[in-house]
Image (cartoon, coloured by chain):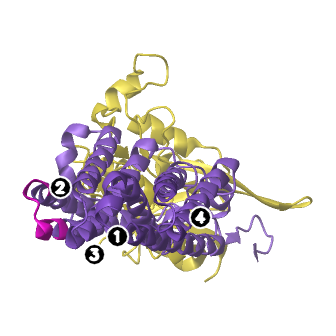
Amino acid sequence: MASRRQRYWDLRAAGNFIGGGTGAGLIVVAALAASMGAPFRLALLLGLGCVLAGLSLVWLEIGKPWRALNVFFHPHTSWMTREAIVAGVLVPTGLIGLVAGSVAAVVVAAALACGFLYCQARMLRAARGIPAWRQAEIVPFILATGLAEGSGLYLIAGAQTLIAQTPIGRWLALALVAGLLREAAWWAYRAGLARTPGAAPSLAAFDTPPARLVRGAQLAGLALIGLALTCTAVAPGLTQVLACTGGALAALAGWGMKARLITRAAFTRAAAIPVIPTRGRRASHAR
Amino acid sequence: MTRYVMVADLRRCVGCQTCTAACKEGNGTPPGVQWRRVLDLESGTYPQVNRVFVPVGCQHCADPPCLEVCPSTATRQRPDGIVTIDYDLCIGCSYCIMACPYDARSLVDHTDYAFGDAPTAAEAARAEHKTAGVATKCTFCVGRIDAGTARGLVPGQDPDATPLCVNSCISGALSFGDIDDPTGPVARLLAENKSFRMHESEGTGPGFYYIWDKGTL
């Protein structure tokens, strides 16, 4: 039996990983901003909104949405349960930070956001029926992608006030580092995939024109952020445009890649037998 | 300790799909859902071509990946090794489907019938309508096993306590029983023949053995 593309998790499930990654990344950057005295409320609000939107999307996908609370029943081994529990603490903590303006609460929320994102990465890693998800390199890839999306969006969310209140260079540098980390994680993931038996259909799904477009957006975003970093002192207006465009591309590329990872590159394992059975009096032989 | 397993003798299976039909009829699974399938695998190139029929389904693993990921504890493992799904707990998140290396689970989100809008007599009698929106899979006909053993019958030896696919197999390719009973037919079959388990390197400990030749492997 050939492997086949899984058909149970669609864009709604992908939306959970997109919203969760972007939201967690934004919350982490918001905590950094809060601890440095930079604007953080909008980023924190957007981050919490993204996390909730992602969870709402996955709620729309499950077969028995009115039993959704059963998701909390298996924290011993299920990363989905752990993700739900962490989200249950993250959202109120973030709201406290938002309403009270408490830096400590925002930092705690950021730690929880990291945990939430880690749970999402481990959820994919635990899906042993999907070769494209189960390999170890998926964990750093999902983590780095979330940070790249969040730091990219922060360049837009804070664009109106960043230049006036804080040096934008540090946020551009953060987005650049996050983008480079994602780039490294992507190549490590792809190399791991190439070594994985039965992953050829997934690799092919990452070589289609839409996937190349996503990769192009990722590289273009990285280049624009790098360019913006070089002209912060000489052309503030241009820097703002480059930062916003680069940040948007960084986020869009992450969303596109995760949508492909969940809905297009997720193939099941093919059935395989290590030997050919003997028939009649013929000698057996290995395939 | 009892550990129920299934054995498929690949030398005997002719790919007739009678087990598939018996499972569908007996369990009333909806269109498109087959808990017991028979794969038709081909290998080699002309003229050296091999064709093998491989019955597949839930492997009732000793260390089931589906159980590990299930967030609702709907997936459970009985002491006799049979992996079950509590349809009243399952939230239909499909995570177990993603975790199964054997592609053995299904989920349909609405009740569907084989012929039009009305159920056939078999569907009406046997289909559990509460399976819409939750994950389903082969149960080793656990209801038959429990009812049979309660009457003192031996699964794998008495048809009334044996999975329907095994009962229906026309070539005697499928066997079922307690692998921990050294005098039972399953343990003897495995002792006297070469066998393997699918994706054994996964470490899931599948409870489904495939015999492919005589002698000890």
In which chain is the residue bearing label 1?
B
Mark 3 vs mark 1: tell me if same chain. yes
Q: Secondary structure at mark 2?
A: helix
Residue at the extreme right of the image, as rendered: B47
In which chain is the residue bearing label 2?
A
- Location of residue A111 in the rendering, given as x and y in whole percent from the top left corner: 23, 71
Mark 1 vs mark 4: tell me if same chain. no
Q: Based on the picture, tell me whether residue A263 belongs to the magenta stretch.
A: no
Mark 1 vs mark 2: tell me if same chain. no
Q: Residues within 10 Å of mark 4 (few under 14, many from 20)?
A: some
- Location of residue B196 in the rendering, given as x and y in whole percent from the top left corner: 57, 73
Residue on which disc 4 sits: A223
Examine the rendering and report whether any part of residue B111 can be seen.
yes
* Amino acid found under the numbered disc labelled 3: Met
Residue on which disc 2 sits: A91
Left or right of residue B40, residue B58 in this image: left
* Amino acid found under the numbered disc labelled 2: Val
Residue positioned 21% across, 68% down in the render: A37
- Asked whether the residues under the numbered discs 3 and 1 touch, taking CB atoms below 8 Å apart as contact, a structural biologist would say yes
Chain shown in purple:
A
Chain shown in yellow:
B
Residue at the extreme front of the image, as rendered: A234
Residue on which disc 3 sits: B1
* Amino acid found under the numbered disc labelled 1: Arg
Q: Main secondary structure of the magenta part?
A: helix
Q: Residues within 10 Å of mark 2 (few under 14, many from 20)?
A: some
In which chain is the residue bearing label 4?
A
- Asked whether the residues under the numbered discs 1 and 4 touch, taking CB atoms below 8 Å apart as contact, a structural biologist would say no
State the extent of the magenta-drawn residues as a range: A98-107
Mark 3–mark 4 Cα distance, whole angstroms, equals 63 Å
- Location of residue B215 in the rendering, given as x and y in whole percent from the top left corner: 64, 81
